Amino acid sequence: MVSRRTLATPEAGVTVCSQPGPAEVLAALLAGNRRFAAGRPRYGHDVSSPAARTAAHQPSALVIGCLDSRVPPEAVLDQDFGTTVVVRTGGHVLDAAALGSVEFAVSVFNVSVVLVLGHQYCGAVAATVAAVDSGVRPDGALGALVADIEPAVREAVAGGAAPGDLAEVAIDGHVRRSVDRLLDLPLVRDRCASGDLAVLGGRYQIDTGEVSLLRRIG
C-alpha cells in the first residue's frame, strides 16, 4: 500500500506547502464568478502562459461538478491554471473514484475549499425525476447514477414541491446531500473540525452565470 507520506514526496511531483485559509480561497472563487458573470474574466486559459507551463502544482480549491458542457468550473469561477482541481461526473454523483479524488486533493494537495457545484437545468436530475415519475429506472451504470440522485427527488416530492419546480428543488437538495456525504470521509471531517477546510455546496444559474452558496461546513 502506498502511504500518503509517499504520495506527497517531491519525487511524485507534488510538494505540500501551507495554503491560504478557507475564507481567502472562497473569496477568490466568488470574485472570479462575479467577473465571469459580468463578462470581464481575467483568465483566458492561454496554454502559453507561465501558469500553464510550470512543473509546480499546488491548487487551493477542489470543485466537484457536473459533466454538463455549459458549466466548466474553471471558466465560471474564472480561475487560472494551477489554482483549482476539478472532479466531474453526471449530476456530480460521488462514486468511489470521485471520493478517492476528494481524499487525494484534501490529503496531498491540502486544499482549503471543497465546493460541490450543482447547476440549473441539470439533465441528470431531470432524468431522475422522469424515472421517479414513471417508476422505471434505467439499466446499467446510468441506473446507478439515477439511484444516487433519487433520494433528493423524493425529498423534494415529500416537501411539497410543485411538479414544475420538482427538478430545480431536487438540484439544490442533491447538492446539500452531496456536501453531507463528503463529511463521511474522516479526512474531510477532521480538517473541517480543525478549521483548515471548508466544504460548501453551490448552485450555478445558467440563465445569469452566477453562483450562489447553499450550504457550508467548516
Image: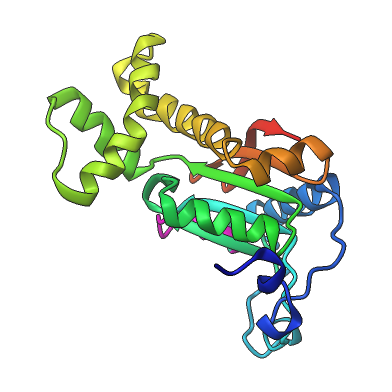
Seen at 84% across and 67% down, the residue is 17
Residue 1, given in percent of the width and then of the height, sits at: 55, 67
**Is residue 131 toward the left or the right of residue 196 in the image?**
left
Q: Give residue 46's quadrant in the image.
A: bottom right
The C terminus: image quadrant? top right
Residue 140, given in percent of the width and then of the height, sits at: 17, 49
Is there any visible trace of residue 82 in the rendered image?
no
> Does 196 sit above or below residue 45?
above
Residue 211, given in percent of the width and then of the height, sits at: 62, 43
> Does 160 sit above or below residue 84?
above
Magenta stretch contains residue 195: no
The type of colouring in the image is: rainbow
Seen at 60% across and 54% down, the residue is 103
Is there any visible trace of residue 218 in the rendered image?
yes
Tell me where the magenta segment starts and ends, as one range.
67-74
Seen at 39% across and 18% down, the residue is 156
Q: What is the count of numbered marks?
A: 0
**Is residue 100 toward the left or the right of residue 68 in the image?**
right
Q: Main secondary structure of the magenta part?
A: loop
**Is residue 164 toward the left or the right of residue 81 in the image?**
left
Instruction: Name, please, the residue furthest toward the front.
Output: 1
Q: Give residue 217's quadrant in the image.
A: top right
> Does 145 sit above or below residue 19?
above
Q: Give residue 91's quadrant in the image.
A: top left
Q: Closer to the camera, 133 or 36?
A: 133
Residue 101, given in percent of the width and then of the height, sits at: 54, 59
Seen at 76% across and 47% down, the residue is 26
